């Protein structure tokens, strides 16, 4: 009887130990997080490297040869339309104008005298015609000398900002020499190149609200004023497959300057897009994969084709459906064909938490 009781106690102890071990194993078995792709309307931001240019940016060059006798502006100075900027030896051309004006006066006297004689039939009509032609020639030379004198004064053709001065006061300047440049920064043109596929998407959008764009500046801040795509060039570059776009940005505070760089951001709407978290993917030889959970709760690696890329999300163009279940966390803890235990959570409730670091 005593032996029987000992055997029964031993069996109970073994059974308890076995059950406890089984329960501990079950309790320590990790449950992984699984979700499904989500179909939704969203917006993706395409970014393109842009070159910032002034709406008007011109070179101011000498139109006459001589010494720079007057310089009335400094580098970086704002000037108004018509403002005098430089003078090149005005005295010499002023003397030429005076000489031409005297010649006009002389030929006018000759013409009037000849006309009186012609009216009295003292001289032939041909002499009157020659006197008249001589007067016209003198007036033309006077007009030319006035033009030369005007060319000695370089004035601002529009409101703008003076760039670096290439010639200083007293410099000998030849005709055509660069003195400085003038930039109108009231509006800025930003040029950027768009790949052919994205150009076609842009052009076929029924809603052209995507013509409004933003500019991400070099300090990683978005420019305060949105721009608008106004021009698309005629031809694609056969070497790059891109076509140039031009967006116009208002610049009331003058923050943007000619020659800056930035990134033009265009919002593109995605209708009924299939979305998955970026953290649910892994890469093998430059190809994207996810682990799909099959009906037997086994994970199978599947290649997918990525479309647009957003913050923490991918648009999937091929390889998945909205009914598939994909492994979201613990990708490094499994291998192909492993059987898993998981918790399922709808992706819509997960998206706000996606900025948390992945495993």
Image (tube, rainbow, N blue to C red):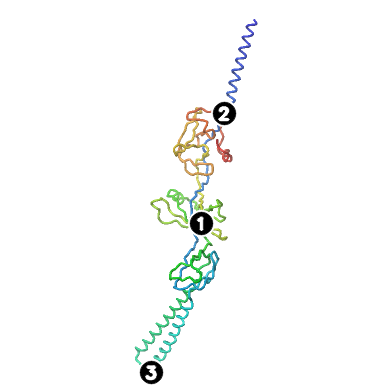
Q: Would you name the residue on which mark 3 appears?
A: 120
Q: For the C terminus, which image quadrant?
A: top right
* Eye-nearest disc, 2 or 1: 1
Q: How many numbered discs, if any?
A: 3
Q: Of marks 3 and 2, which one's residue comes earlier in the chain?
A: 2
Q: Where is residue 195 in the image (x, y as percent from the top left)?
A: 44, 50
Cβ–Cβ below 8 Å for labels 3 and 2?
Answer: no
Q: Mark 3, residues whose alpha carbon is within 10 Å: few (<14), some, or many (≥20)?
A: few
Counting residues from the N terminus, which is met first, the one under dot 1 or under dot 3? 3
Cα distance in 3D space between marks 3 and 2: 126 Å
Q: Nearer the viewer, mark 3 or mark 2?
A: 2
Image x and y of residue 6, in percent: 63, 9
Q: Which residue is drawn at 62% across and 12% down?
A: 10
Mark-to-mark CA distance, 2 and 1: 53 Å
Quickly name the residue at label 2.
Answer: 30
Q: In this view, does 127 lie to the left or right of 317?
A: left
Q: What residue did someone put label 1 on?
A: 260
Q: What element carries label 3?
A: loop
Position of residue 133 measured from the top left corner of the image (x, y, whole percent): 38, 84
Q: Is mark 1 on a helix, strand or loop?
A: loop
Identify the mark nearer the N-term, 2 or 1: 2
For label 1, the crowd category at 10 Å Cα-Cα, with few meaning under 14, some 14 to 19 and many 20 or more, is: some
Q: Which of 316 and 257 is in front in this view?
A: 257
Q: Is residue 343 above or below residue 92?
A: above
User: At which x and y percent is residue 312?
Assistant: 54, 42
Closest to the observer, 219 or 67: 67
Q: Do the residues labelled 2 and 1 touch (CB within 8 Å)?
A: no
For image coordinates 46% across by 82% down, the residue present is 98
Disc 1 and disc 3 in contact, CB within 8 angstroms: no
In this rendering, the answer to whether 292 lies above or below 174 is: above
Q: Which residue is nearer to you in this view: 186 or 96?
A: 96
């Amino acid at each position: 009887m005593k032996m029987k009781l000992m055997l029964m106690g031993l069996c109970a102890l073994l059974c308890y130990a076995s059950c406890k071990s089984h329960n501990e194993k079950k309790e320590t078995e990790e449950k992984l997080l699984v979700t499904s792709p989500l179909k939704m309307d969203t917006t993706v931001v395409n970014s393109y490297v842009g070159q910032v240019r002034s709406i008007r940016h011109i070179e101011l060059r000498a139109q006459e040869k001589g010494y720079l006798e007057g310089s009335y502006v400094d580098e970086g100075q704002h000037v108004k339309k018509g403002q005098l900027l430089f003078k090149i030896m005005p005295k010499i051309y002023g003397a030429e104008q005076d000489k031409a004006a005297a010649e006009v006066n002389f030929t006018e006297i000759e013409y009037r005298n000849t006309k009186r004689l012609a009216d009295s039939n003292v001289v032939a009509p041909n002499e009157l015609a020659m006197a008249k032609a001589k007067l016209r020639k003198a007036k033309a030379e006077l007009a030319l000398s006035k033009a030369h004198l005007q060319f000695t004064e370089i004035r601002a053709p529009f409101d703008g900002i003076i760039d670096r001065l290439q010639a200083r006061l007293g410099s000998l300047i030849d005709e055509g020499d660069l003195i400085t440049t003038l930039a109108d920064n009231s509006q800025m043109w930003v040029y950027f190149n768009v790949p052919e596929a994205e150009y076609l998407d842009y052009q076929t959008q029924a809603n052209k609200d995507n013509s409004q764009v933003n500019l991400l500046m070099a300090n990683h801040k978005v420019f305060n004023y949105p721009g608008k795509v106004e021009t698309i060039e005629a031809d694609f570059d056969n070497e790059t497959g891109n076509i140039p776009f031009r967006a116009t940005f208002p610049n009331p505070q003058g923050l943007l300057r000619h020659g800056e760089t930035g990134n033009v951001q265009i919002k593109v709407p995605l209708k009924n897009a299939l979305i998955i978290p970026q953290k649910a993917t892994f890469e093998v030889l430059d190809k994207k994969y996810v682990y799909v959970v099959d009906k037997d709760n086994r994970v199978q690696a599947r290649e997918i084709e990525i479309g647009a890329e957003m913050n923490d999300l991918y648009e999937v163009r091929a390889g998945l459906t909205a009914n598939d279940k994909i492994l979201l966390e613990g990708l490094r803890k499994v291998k192909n064909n492993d059987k898993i235990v998981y918790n399922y959570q709808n992706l819509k409730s997960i998206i706000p938490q996606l900025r948390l670091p992945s495993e």
